Image: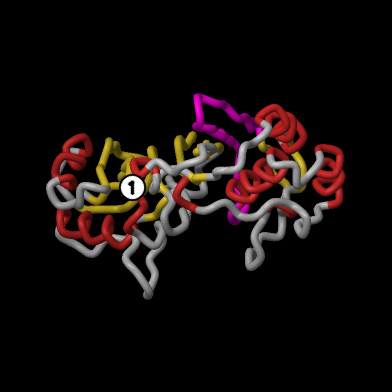
Amino acid sequence: MRRKFKLTIAYDGTAYHGWQRQQNGITVQEIMEDAVSCVVGEDTAVTGCSRTDAGVHARKFVCSFFADTTIPAEKLPFVLNTMLPPDIRAQGCETAPEDFNARFDAVRKTYKYQILNAPFADPFLRNYAWHYPVKLDFGKMEAACDIIRGEKDFRCFMAAGSKVKNTVRNLSELRAEKDGDLITVTASSNGFLYNMVRIIVGTLIYTGNGKLGLEELAALVERGDRRLLGITAPPQGLRLYDVFY
């Protein structure tokens, strides 16, 4: 019987050119579609909840697909994991309504970004954190989170090339936490613009290193001015942490 499946996976994105299939490199979607197709015995398109960029990771990533298979949903992860590479793991699966869409049915997503603010890099974090050796003012970074957080037009935190027309988002959570030299930025929203989290992190860095004052930041956000905000943080520090439906 043909059914819709809701599959949850986790992956280390270091070796991949993001989620979405591309001609210039191996992607997570390509690996997943090949594995699912092999398991269910038919070519199967897999829809992902987000288009993560090259080098970005996912702790919880939800996929959806149709398949005609007798394998119980709860058994599919065990079968898939025998075919997937070790940096991609199926975590759970259930049947879903036929109209379920992993991407468009998501009501909120949470991302986390790690910054290693230490004089020397940690080789064990090279693929999972942005090493930033200049000392940061953590208090100013926390204050910047308060300025950026909320429901507003986030066009100044969107990378060029996006075709999205409505740039208003509700950033319900934006906070920075410090544990020794490791700073973790958590962002939750009903939707994210292209590179939005990475630009926010770059902007927090600019406030923390003194390049951007808090009053100036508030004015730039109000005007929607991208030019003087922070750089786009590198991808390896970012991971999709949770998805809510």
Q: Nearer the viewer, residue 137 or 4?
A: 137
Q: Position of residue 143 (x, y in %)?
A: 74, 30
Q: Position of residue 135 (x, y in %)?
A: 62, 37
Q: Which residues are magenta?
A: 172-195
Q: Residue furthest bottom?
A: 23
Q: Measuring 60% from the left and 45% from the top, which residue is drawn there?
A: 191
Q: Nearer the viewer, residue 188 or 181?
A: 181
Q: Is residue 44 above or below residue 58?
A: below
Name the residue type under label 1: Asp
Quarter occupied by residue 176:
top right
Quarter occupied by residue 96:
top left
Horizontal side, residue 37 vs residue 233: left or right: left
Location of mark 1 (residue): 12
Q: Main secondary structure of the magenta part?
A: strand
Q: Is residue 173 visible?
A: yes
Q: Residues within 10 Å of mark 1 (few under 14, many from 20)?
A: many
For residue 177: magenta?
yes
Q: Nearer the viewer, residue 126 or 71?
A: 126
Q: Position of residue 18 (x, y in %)?
A: 41, 58
Q: Is residue 50 above or below residue 95?
A: below
Q: Secondary structure at mark 1?
A: loop
